[in-house]
Image (tube, rainbow, N blue to C red):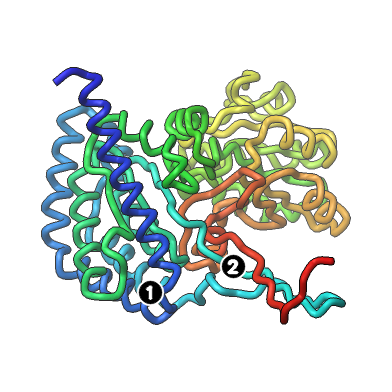
Amino acid sequence: MSRTEISESIREQVHDLGRKARKASRELMGLTTEQKNDALNAMADALERRKDHIQDVNAQDIAAAKENGLSDAMVDRLVLNDQRMAAMIQGFRDIAKLPDPVGRILKSWEKENGLLLQKTTVPIGVIGMIYESRPNVTGDAAALCLKASNAIILRGGSEALRSNQAIADALQEGGAATKLPGHAVQLVPVRDREAVTALITMDEFVDVIIPRGGEGLIRAVAENATVPVLKHYEGVCHVFVDAEADPEKARAITENAKCQRPGVCNAAETLLVDAAVAESWLPGMAEILERRGVELRGDDRACALVSTMKPATEEDWYTEYLDMILSVRVVDGIEEAVRHINHYGSGHSDAIVTESREHQVYFGRMVDSAAVYINTSTRFTDGAEFGMGAEIGISTDRLHARGPVALEELTTYKYVVTGDGQIKE
């Protein structure tokens, strides 16, 4: 079979998934909250029953990943240990307990001519999810989409195909025992990248694509998709220690934002320190960070205060390290800090530490990011931490969602207009 024939075969396979997903999405619109919750709980039960099989298959993916030379960090993301399995299963049960995001009346008003207008939340329709490594995303994404009455087509990384398929099989088994449409959750079963191309250009069947993974994946999807994409490229997150910061709060927040889990998108990558407190505060903070194994890269003024600090390059200010590396800059006040963040940042999560109410308000208003933090760590940008139950990803876009993308963000709205025979004159 020629390459062209293979590509056409894969495209038709993906299009078949799309046709089935579109049909399922129409059927999902008719399900009650109770029926959706029954399906979510049945899926949790199926995952429990198939847990041993899923972990056996996952072990095969892990072994193959090690043979192929994947880094320890990448291998760790593949692992479905007891704790991660339990969290995925509990996620279904927790989401079943959340309020239904569909059918809420956002606004209602009556016109002088007697027409009643209601702005009502509805499902988006069909979600295409493209992600790397973490097979637990298969369950998390499916649960969120189904609660919001969306059909989902999942395309995980080739390194986790066996694990993803085993999870998807369990979800389909659980759903089959309920009113859930048979093709509400589908997995692209091929490793070929042509499948991604087919999925992200399938406008007639897919309403939005959500990529989750490294910058390379997200940029490739965004640049080639004809379907709308909900995304964030990077998490170049900042902590700014203001002249009026509480020193102890600043130390704790900075250490947590950088060190608690450095390989995630909401970890701090740059520390900005007001020149008024840099000499008294920064050397002690640097000692704490270096003791934790953080490599510091600073501007001239920061390096003058901390002799062990390496000089930062212009590229450092733009870099999402996802590692124990932190850029450090001394700035002349809050306005310069905000200019730095808005110029070099990625619009993800940025924090100020200050006791000044005026500076808190200014920072909150002027920093152009999806999540702005006052006297707390950037590590809270997460659906569960925000009280949303879970998330399908983080968006730094402005349309249609920004920040954690959870149940509410997986809906759109329509207008329902009720009259009593009125006609336009």
Above or below residue 60? Residue 193 is above
Q: Residue at x 82, y 34 (%)?
A: 336
Above or below residue 233? Residue 162 is below
Residue located beneath label 2 in the image: 121
- Label 1 CA crowd tier, 10 Å (few <14, some 14–19, many 20+): many
Decide which of 202, 235 is in the foreground and name it: 202
Residue 202 falls in image quadrant: top left
The image shows residue 136 at horizontal and vertical percentages of 31, 54
Q: Amino acid at mark 1?
A: Lys
Q: Residue at x 66, y 46 (%)?
A: 398
Decide which of 260, 396 is in the foreground and name it: 396
Between disc 2 and disc 1, whose residue precedes? 1
Q: Secondary structure at mark 2?
A: strand
Decide which of 174, 345 is in the foreground and name it: 174
Compared across the picture, whether 280 is left or right of 184 comes to right
Contact? badges 2 and 1 (CB < 8 Å): no
The image shows residue 254 at horizontal and vertical percentages of 61, 47
Q: Secondary structure at mark 1?
A: helix
Compared across the picture, whether 126 is left or right of 184 comes to right
Q: Residue at x 71, y 24 (%)?
A: 304
Residue located beneath label 1 in the image: 36
Q: Residue at x 47, y 34 (%)?
A: 218
Q: Amino acid at mark 2?
A: Thr
The image shows residue 133 at horizontal and vertical percentages of 31, 42
Compared across the picture, whether 307 is left or right of 337 comes to left
Which numbered circle lies on residue 239?
none
